[in-house]
Amino acid sequence: MAGTIRINKFFTEHGICSRREADRLIESGVITINGRVAKLGDQVISTDVIAREGQVIPWGKPTLYIKYHKPIGVTTTSESHVARNIIAEIGHPERIFPIGRLDKDSSGLILLTNDGNIVNEILRAEFGHEREYLVRVDRPFDHSFLDRMARGVVILGSVTRPCRMTRVGHDQFRIILTEGRNRQIRRMCQALGYRVIELHRTRIMHITVNGLRSGEWKALTAQEREQLMQAVGRSCV
C-alpha cells in the first residue's frame, strides 16, 4: 500500500473493525506502531509494524467492498465460462466475488468483495440483515395478498420469515426480507397464484442502489464501509 494512512483507517481497510472500534483500542493503549504506543491520528506506512497487545497485525491487501447495479441478463457467478458472468461484466483488476446471488432475470444491487470472512456475516439468516426489492407481478392484487406475503408463505418445505410489504401500484409492491432463499420472492408469489414480471433489488442493509446506473459499479464510500463493519459486528474485542 503506497503512501500514508491514518492508523484507524488501517483497521477498516483490512476489514478488521470499524474506525470507532479502532479508536477505542488506540485510546486504551493496546495498539503499538514499531514498538511505541499508538496515538489517535497517527499515520502509518506499509513498512510499519502494527501490533495489538504484542500480536503483529499483517498488512496484506486492503479489503475491497463494491456495490454493483446488475442488469437483467448478467449471471451472478464467478465461473469464467458462463456468458455475461458478473466478474467479467465488472472487469475489476483485483480478484473479487459476489456476496449472495441475484437471479439472471432480476436487476439491482449486489455487493462484491475480496473479504471471504464477511460473506456469512451478511448472508446468514439469523443475523436478520434487510434486503429490499421492488416487484411487479402479472396481475392486480388485493390487500389479502400483501397480508399473506407479510405473514409468511410455504416454499421449499417451510414457511418464510415474516416480512414487510408495501403497495406501490395495482400490480407492484415493495418487500423487505431478512432471509434469502433461492428465488424466494418468485416462489412466494407463485405459491399465491402470481407470476413475477419484474424484480429489482434496491437495498442491502444500509447500502442502496441509488445513484448507480444499470451496469455501473462503485467502491463503497468510507461511511458505507464504516456502517458495514458495525452492522456485521466487526468489533475488535
Image (cartoon, rainbow, N blue to C red):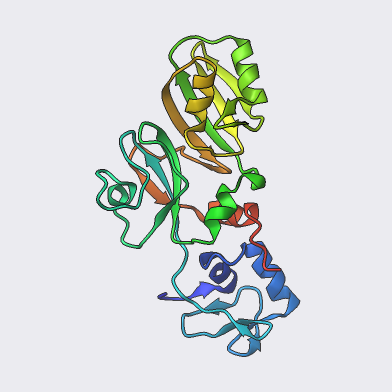
Is residue 236 rendered to the left or right of residue 101?
A: right
Q: Residue furthest right?
A: 28
Give the image location of residue 77, x and y in percent. Answer: 36, 48
**Residue at the (33%, 41%) spot, across then down:** 75
**Residue at the (37%, 39%) spot, across then down:** 70
The image shows a total of numbered marks equal to 0
Q: Quadrant of residue 131?
A: top right
Q: Residue furthest bottom?
A: 35
Give the image location of residue 118, x and y in percent. Answer: 54, 58
Q: Quadrant of residue 93?
A: bottom left
Q: In this rendering, is residue 57 above or below 73? A: below
Camera-side residue of 197 and 170: 197
Q: In this rendering, is residue 154 above or below 75? A: above
Q: Residue furthest front?
A: 157
Give the image location of residue 145, x and y in percent. Answer: 59, 14
State which quarter of the image contains the N terminus: bottom left
**Residue at the (56%, 48%) spot, across then down:** 123
Q: Quadrant of residue 10?
A: bottom right
**Residue at the (30%, 46%) spot, across then down:** 85
Give the image location of residue 16, x and y in percent. Answer: 58, 67
